[in-house]
Image: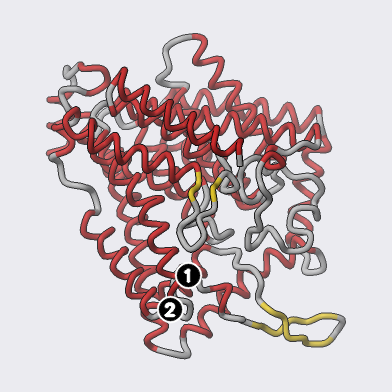
Amino acid sequence: MVLILIIDCLAVAWLCATAARRGFEATLPVAAFLLMLFPVESQIKLPGLLDLTTQRIVVATLVVLYFSKGREGNRGSGGSPLPFKNLITLVIVWMLVASANSVVPDVSFKSTLSQCLDYFVPYYIFAKSVTKVQTVNKILYGFVASMFVCSIFGMLEVYRNWTVLSLFPSMSHHFSDLPGAVTDRGVRAQSTFGHPILFGAALALAIPIALYLLTVVQSKGQRVFVWIAILSMVLCIYQTESRGPWLALGMSLALLLFLGEKQMRKTLSVIALLTMAVLVLRPGVWHTIADLYGETMSTDTAQGESYQWRYVLFNISKQELSKSFSRSLWGYGPESFYYLGLTTEALSDGEMHTVKVESCDSAVVELMMDTGYVGFSLIVLVLLRTAVATFRNRRKLPPPANALCSIFLVNIVAFCFLMTNVQLFGWGQQSYMLWVLIALAMTYPAIVCSPVMAGGSSQIAPVLVDALSS
């Protein structure tokens, strides 16, 4: 408890001091760093109320600073319309409808309130407060710096058998409590996240961001730091032994080979050569990857059963939702999945047995079950519209301004893919990253065209305005 209080006080002091010295907008990169760094275990429990996590302390501090300092310092952006204002309002309304009809209303209303405070409030603040490309780059730098620190913790976990989570009160997570979820593949890097696959998912998003930063950082020291961060994050995503994040990162890097600028493609070529060298010099790495793939394709292994379980979950959700038209519309209520007592038939020892459903390794399934097809469709619409807008902005903005659009696009695509692999939507540090990235992706074109862009220069603003209006 003492450690958590110290962390919370230091986080508030850092944000307030930054706002006092450099203005509210300068607090956003600090907030991005802090939101990704701390585990959910860093919390003060308030019986009957929402638990006071360090992230919520950070968000609450941002809200106070925004209304006291942010709006007067960012009048230009503060008057601009909020992207997805109506759509996100509809998402919130539908979550309330689903909560009102939930099988566990108290749990669902608490979950809805939690998501509004944890993700929609930061989305609003970041979308309304960033006025300079320089700030965008610093926010992304904050994400990478935080994931670098988490990677250090991950390496200590794997190579020194010490976990930073041992400093915090232990907590249970729905899918980390399953027998063998963490130990069936030996020691897996988890760092400050709720599960290795969540850590891997955050790394899969952060590595492309770091590749972009290599194209914009100017000092030699920053370039060295970003390279060290990239190598550390690549090592840690391997040590998570999580197939979904591996595939998501591979997809992102492959897309960047086509979408990235010349300098980024050169960087990807260097990383590809380093990867090939590691596979040749350390054949055990290749054997680990190949063995995990072989086990995934086999139905007689824990990894194979885990892979097949995703398809079983999807079928279970379709069957349950088809039982009632109203449930197919608004589901069973946010965070209700684990209270439904679902069962399925599974083959064991040559006989069929009834098995209790104790995990939901798919954000897609949980969204459908919790908020029905309508709620799921609204979230899909947010992600899809972000991806489409980002793709269009990449085509409209001239280089090098459009390079960041490629990063936003591959991260949205990667997150959507990961949603089919694990329940990572609506909780955890990676969800903070998602909503901040959506806010930046949707406001970036206007920021680039702003006269205060990137430290105050507006020389290319007329060119960008012409490109966007064409």
x, y (%) of residue 4? Answer: 57, 39
Vertical relation: 193 (above or below) 256: below
- The residue under label 2 is 102
* Residue at the (81%, 64%) spot, across then down: 301
SS class of the residue under badge 1?
helix
Q: Nearer the viewer, residue 196 or 97?
A: 97
Q: Amino acid at mark 2?
A: Ser
Count the marks.
2
**451 relative to 272 in the view: left or right:** left
Mark 1 Cα-neighbour bin, 10 Å: few <14, some 14–19, many ≥20: some
The Cα–Cα distance between marks 2 and 1, rounded to whole angstroms, is: 9 Å
**377 relative to 303 in the view: left or right:** left
Vertical relation: 375 (above or below) 323: above
- Tag of residue 200: none
x, y (%) of residue 190? Answer: 67, 44
Mark 2 Cα-neighbour bin, 10 Å: few <14, some 14–19, many ≥20: many
Q: Nearer the viewer, residue 56 or 252?
A: 56
- Tag of residue 107: 1
**27 relative to 78 in the view: left or right:** right
Comes first in the chain, label 2 or label 1: 2
